[in-house]
Image: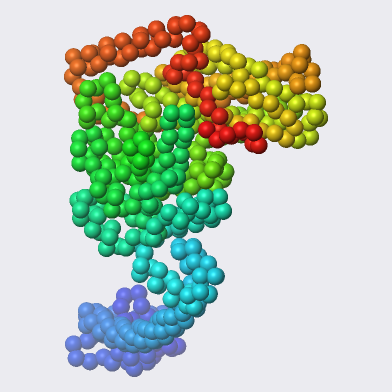
């Protein structure tokens, strides 16, 4: 009756052949299919109960999803096991490689030289490998690893420089202190010592109280200073608990003047922790606790290494086995013809004060004639002229015969040196001038030799907290006393010009050294 193919409709709008339908989805039970002729070669079947069919489809899809999930779970487990094994193998390899590297001795050589400054000679003497040297040194001074290299280098450089020049000074150094000794000092003073301070004292426990001192000297006609580096036990005995210097530990001591440099082991009374300073009593406050400070260094390392650098660089001259703390500015040199004049300066805190303002400076003059000068260039100094200017612009002129009461003769290759001092009522000032000479072979012919301008400035200072805490009435009374002091100074400046050079307030000339024909001091 029908031509062509028959088709079964699963749902409305979906067509398949009748044979396929009966094979895939047999008709029976509650299913009722209605065949309907569609065209000449196809039939259309409508499903009245599509719900059951959808359940079958969902069930089959769920089974497929479960199979896929199991497959991916298996693959994930497999790759996880594989990854763990690979990581374990890699970690074992890395661990073994690191172990090999840590035992590679040349790698420890760099660390030994960087942190402990151990040389090849020391390694040979101790007959140890680099790794053992590093471990042994770390177990001894490992807590100072951030400071040890800088401080050890400073000590090595200082001893190397001083051994041929000041052998007695090097022999006065003491062996390093033990950790137990430093811990005992901390318990005694009730404060922790700075690590860089402890590190230095592990290398050398100060020096014997001898002259000259390691921390420099200064000599004038009636004043001498030489500072020794105190050992830790002596320093602990001088630890200050009194007002004005509370929690301050002395670093140096001068047996002639009693002068000391202090380090603040705790922040107190306006001081920063670890600052190094010279004390300067406030003479106007009428209070023993009023002590101003000239700051020398922010830390022990800063203080010590800067001093050593000044010594080993030749900045501080060495005269008769003593280190003199003069600072030379390369620009403070002037040449006139065959004669060169150079100047170096120094600040004397022990003779200075902030209140009243009185800043004491010393300077060193070196007069030298070139060795290539002709013999007839020999000359003799007749007089000197100074122009002194303070920070306010006030000018004072000084002129007089000779220097230090003498009239030195300068000839080719000869040198004449002497020191002189001056004071300022301001924190800084400068001097310049000239010397007048005459030729030995032409006595009527005179000429001037320029003295270069040289500046002098006191170090940073901090006013005593006791002064800052004064009441208005006390402060006004103290200001009046300072004004009276300034008036007295002004009266002295206006005195007879003949006494200008004799006044100790201004200039004192002292010979330091004149080769072949001069004496020291």
Question: x%, y% of residue 148?
Answer: 42, 58
**Residue 454 visible, this orientation:** yes
Q: Residue at x 22, y 22 (%)?
A: 286
Residue appearing at x 46%, y 42% in the figure: 216
Q: Position of residue 220 (x, y in %)?
A: 47, 30
Is 454 situated above or below 91?
A: above
Q: Which quadrant holds residue 348?
A: top left
What residue do we see at 24% from left, 22% from top? 285
Q: Is residue 452 above or below residue 166?
A: above
Q: Could you tell me which residue is drawn at 29 percent across and 85 percent down?
A: 66
Taking depth in this image into account, of 278 and 230 the one nearest to the observer is 230
Camera-nearest residue between 395 and 371:
371
**Residue 453: image location, x then y, percent:** 59, 23
Q: How many marks?
A: 0
Task: Name which quarter of the figure residue 267 lies in.
Answer: top left
- Horizontal placement of 368 versus 53: left or right? right
């Amino acid at each position: 009756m029908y031509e062509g193919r028959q088709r079964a409709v699963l749902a409305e709008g979906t067509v398949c052949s009748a044979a396929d339908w009966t094979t895939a989805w047999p008709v029976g039970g509650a299913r009722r299919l209605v065949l309907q002729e569609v065209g000449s070669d196809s039939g259309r079947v409508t499903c009245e109960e599509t719900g059951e069919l959808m359940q079958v489809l969902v069930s089959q899809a769920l089974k497929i999803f479960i199979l896929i999930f199991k497959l991916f779970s298996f693959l994930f487990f497999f790759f996880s096991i594989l990854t763990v094994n690979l990581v374990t193998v890699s970690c074992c390899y890395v661990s073994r490689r690191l172990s090999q590297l840590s035992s590679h001795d040349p790698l420890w050589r760099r660390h030994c030289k960087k942190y402990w400054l151990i040389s090849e000679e020391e390694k040979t003497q101790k007959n140890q490998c680099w790794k053992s040297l590093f471990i042994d040194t770390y177990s001894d001074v490992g807590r100072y690893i951030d400071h040890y290299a800088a401080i050890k280098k400073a000590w090595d450089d200082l001893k190397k420089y001083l051994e041929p020049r000041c052998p007695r000074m090097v022999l006065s150094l003491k062996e390093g202190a033990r950790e137990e000794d430093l811990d005992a000092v901390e318990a005694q003073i009730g404060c922790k010592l700075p690590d860089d301070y402890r590190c230095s004292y592990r290398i050398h426990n100060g020096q014997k109280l001898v002259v000259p001192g390691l921390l420099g000297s200064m000599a004038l006609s009636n004043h001498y200073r030489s500072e020794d580096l105190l050992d830790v036990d002596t320093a602990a005995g001088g630890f200050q608990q009194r007002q004005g210097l509370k929690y301050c530990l002395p670093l140096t001591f001068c047996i002639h003047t009693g002068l000391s440099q202090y380090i603040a082991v705790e922040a107190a009374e306006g001081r920063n922790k670890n600052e190094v300073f010279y004390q300067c009593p406030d003479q106007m406050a009428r209070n023993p606790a009023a002590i101003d400070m000239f700051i020398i260094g922010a830390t022990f390392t800063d203080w010590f290494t800067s001093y050593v650098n000044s010594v080993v660089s030749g900045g501080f001259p060495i005269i008769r086995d003593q280190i003199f703390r003069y600072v030379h500015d390369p620009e403070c040199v002037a040449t006139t013809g065959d004669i060169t004049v150079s100047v170096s300066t120094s600040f004397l805190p022990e003779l200075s004060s902030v209140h009243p303002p009185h800043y004491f400076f010393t300077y060193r003059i070196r007069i030298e004639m070139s060795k290539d000068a002709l013999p007839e260039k020999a000359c003799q100094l007749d007089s000197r002229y100074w122009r002194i200017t303070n920070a306010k612009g006030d000018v004072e002129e000084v002129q007089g015969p000779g220097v230090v009461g003498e009239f030195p003769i300068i000839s080719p290759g000869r040198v004449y040196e002497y020191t002189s001092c001056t004071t300022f009522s301001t924190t800084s000032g400068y001097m310049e001038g000239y010397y007048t000479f005459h030729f030995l072979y032409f006595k009527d012919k005179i000429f001037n030799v320029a003295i270069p301008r040289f500046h002098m400035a006191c170090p940073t200072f901090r006013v005593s907290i006791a002064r800052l805490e004064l009441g208005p009435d006390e402060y006004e009374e103290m200001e009046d006393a300072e004004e009276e002091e300034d008036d007295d100074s002004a009266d002295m400046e206006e005195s007879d010009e003949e006494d200008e050079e004799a006044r100790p307030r201004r200039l004192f000339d002292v010979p330091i050294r004149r080769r072949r024909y001069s004496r020291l001091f």
